[in-house]
Image (tube, rainbow, N blue to C red):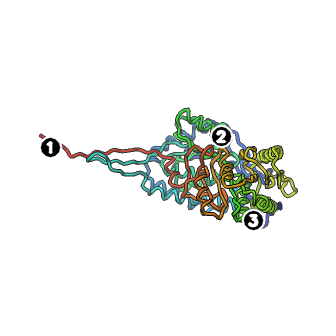
Amino acid sequence: MATTAFPAAEGNEAPTAPRTYLNYIGGQWRPSLSGETFDNTNPARQSELIGTFQRSTAADVDAAVAAAEAALPAWCALPAPARGEIILRAALLLEQRQPELARQMTREMGKPLKETIGDVRTAIDFGKYVAGEGRRAEGETVPSALPDKMCLTVRQPLGVVGIITPWNFPMAIPAWKTLPALLAGNTVVLKPASDTPLSAVNLVEILSEAGLPAGVLNLVTGPGATLGDALVTDPRVAMISLTGSTEVGRHVAELCGRDLRRCSLELGGKNAVIVMDDADLDEAVAAVSWAGFGTTGQRCTATSRVIIHERVASAFAEKLVATAEKLRIGDGLLAETDMGPLVNAGRVQAVHAYTEIGVSEGARLLTGGRPLTDDELAGGAFYAPTVFTDATTEMRIAQEEVFGPFVTILPVRDYDEAIGAANATIYGLSCAIFTENARTAFRAMRDINAGLIYINAGTTGAEPHLPFGGTKQSGNGHRELGRKAVEEFSEIKTVFVSYPARSPRG
């Protein structure tokens, strides 16, 4: 693969001097009660400081929840259209500042600028969509079986919502959780990933500028183990919404289950692209390359497996390796960069461990499989795009989520074997099939056990107006985005109205 040098000063704005960022609680920016902070660095150049953030404790979570609880009555009394207008103003502010927000995100978590622009764009588009939901009917009116009576349903907010977000989409995911929660009339405590707190700070600043009242949205930064457990177990919190690993999701679900607290989980995936022998191989290779190596493979919907008909497996593998080796690796701020770094050095070691596992299991390494420490990439968390082939469904590299630029090819004999392999993991988030046969495509829609199915496209890509989520251990049945997003953050109330004529007075 090709490498790219780091950007020179010419043609690139000099980054602003690092600053110390604060928590946002009750409408005020304030330091953590712990008095401690942590540094956030650029994964492409780990000596470069992005900013210093608050290392919060359970006491800060307590203060944030108290602020959210105090703000709840006034916020849920505000009509939903008025709440939507605030969200729309925020979306328009995001749109005005999209270029700078994207640059800051690239420096913070590494993915190329063209991808971080899309990350911010997702927040913008979903903000505009959710704002309109404030004027939609939120319930239904149905006939009663009895005379002089009507029945209807209305939706009401849950209360204080705790939101825990990951680092791979540091603006989009906080937006697509926070905005519908706010529109539904809830107040929010947001805990972003420690690798990407700046993007969450930017979102909160913009919502505040858009007119969000004090206490409606609160932000605490710091270690997930400490803050997450404090937020999840607080009896004042009515719901937890988490995007993270399946392992973390199980822990959160267990804690929520003790108090019967509502819990929405969007978790891991081991997503497959099925390639049949009638597929357009060039089209399939391009899709797998983007879905497997885009965001350096750090997407819950990333293509991790290619389940391919044995007749075309060799030809596909040769094309995919050639494509992977041409990817330009480097600083995401450069326009020519195709793939940036992993989010931190720990992830480099975690991905490399799976390369060693794949070799030990007997799969054949075709390309990559090593950290990149060339002169141009020294000091960054870079890993080569990696392709294994001749794998079987029992291998760990075909079962476990790697979360890196790591694609495993599994040859199969026919459609039935392909479907069996695709469904043979604990996950069910995203799956795709490439075929020119309409019958095969419709059978796949029926037979694949996943929440997201793509026909002749890769396993990534969401649209704001469509539900997003998975089956099996990729989640717990909830959906994000679309109309479902607002419904997830609200409660149904059924109302019965009787209006019989008064009896004459005698």
Q: Residue at x 76, y 58 (%)?
A: 313
Split into 4 quadrants, where in the image is the N terminus? Answer: bottom right
Q: Residue at x 73, y 53 (%)?
A: 412
Q: Position of residue 170 (x, y in %)?
A: 65, 52
Q: Position of residue 382 (x, y in %)?
A: 80, 53
Split into 4 quadrants, where in the image is the C terminus? Answer: top left
Which residue does the numbered mark 1 point to in the structure image? 504
For label 2, the SS is helix
- Mark 1 vs mark 3: which is more N-terminal? 3
Amino acid residing under circle 2: Val
- Mark 2 vs mark 3: which is more N-terminal? 2
Image quadrant where residue 283 sits: bottom right
Which residue does the numbered mark 2 point to in the structure image? 248
Amino acid residing under circle 1: Pro
User: In the figure, is residue 326 to the left or right of 182?
Assistant: right
Which residue does the numbered mark 3 point to in the structure image? 335
What is the distance, in whole Å, between disc 1 and disc 3 at their CAs? 82 Å
